[in-house]
């Protein structure tokens, strides 16, 4: 069975999707504060590896856990929902099929408890 990573063109496409995703985030007034002072290129690199990994690619995401990364960020339910919406829009922009978007968004939903501070 072909991985989503291979189906959509591998690393190059995943990288373009992640860049498009961060372009959307950068226009959101409510999300900008979460990313102020961050090394955006490093974030994009880590996010690209994360998506390569969950899409079945050979690039493995390593390092701190999602809970560790987001521990002091005070991410709200609303911010998580907006990020998820922007991510879904980005997948649509790049022609990802609806069933594949559902699969990917399910994975994102599964890690919500590691990102959102209650």
Image (cartoon, grey):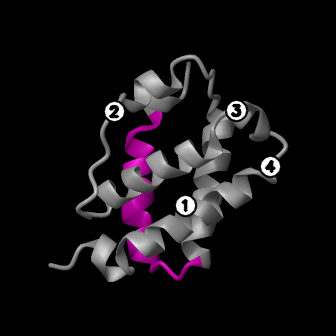
Q: In which quadrant will I find the N terminus? A: bottom left
Numbered disc 3: secondary structure: helix
Which residues are drawn in magenta? Answer: 94-112
Residues at marks 2 and 3, CA–CA distance in whole angstroms: 20 Å
Question: As drawn, is 9 to the left or to the right of 45?
Answer: left
Mark 2 or 4, nearer chain start? 4
> Magenta segment, principal secondary structure?
helix
Q: Residue at x 20, y 79 (%)?
A: 2
Which residue corresponds to the image point at 71% horizontal and 59% vertical from the top-left?
23
Q: In terms of sequence position, does the residue under pointer 1 or pointer 2 come before the other?
A: 1
Left/right of residue 51 with respect to residue 56 in the rendered view? right
Q: Marks 1 and 4: which is nearer the front?
A: 1
Q: Find disc 3 in the rendering and name its residue.
A: 34
CA distance for labels 2 and 4: 27 Å
Gap in angstroms between the C-alphas marked 3 and 1: 17 Å
Where residue 63 appears, x then y in whole percent? 33, 33
In the rendered image, the vertical position of residue 88 relative to residue 37, given as above or below: below
Q: Secondary structure at mark 2?
A: loop
């Amino acid at each position: 069975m072909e991985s989503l990573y291979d189906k959509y063109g591998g690393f190059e496409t995943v990288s373009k999707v992640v860049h498009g995703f961060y372009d959307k985030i950068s226009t959101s007034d409510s999300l900008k504060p979460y990313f102020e002072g961050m090394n955006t290129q490093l974030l994009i690199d880590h996010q690209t590896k994360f998506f390569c990994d969950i899409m079945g690619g050979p690039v493995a995401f390593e390092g701190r856990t999602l809970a560790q990364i987001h521990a002091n960020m005070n991410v709200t339910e609303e911010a998580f929902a907006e990020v998820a919406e922007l991510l879904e829009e980005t997948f649509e922009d790049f022609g990802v099929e609806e069933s594949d978007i559902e699969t990917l968004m399910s994975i994102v939903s599964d890690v919500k408890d590691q990102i959102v501070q209650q």
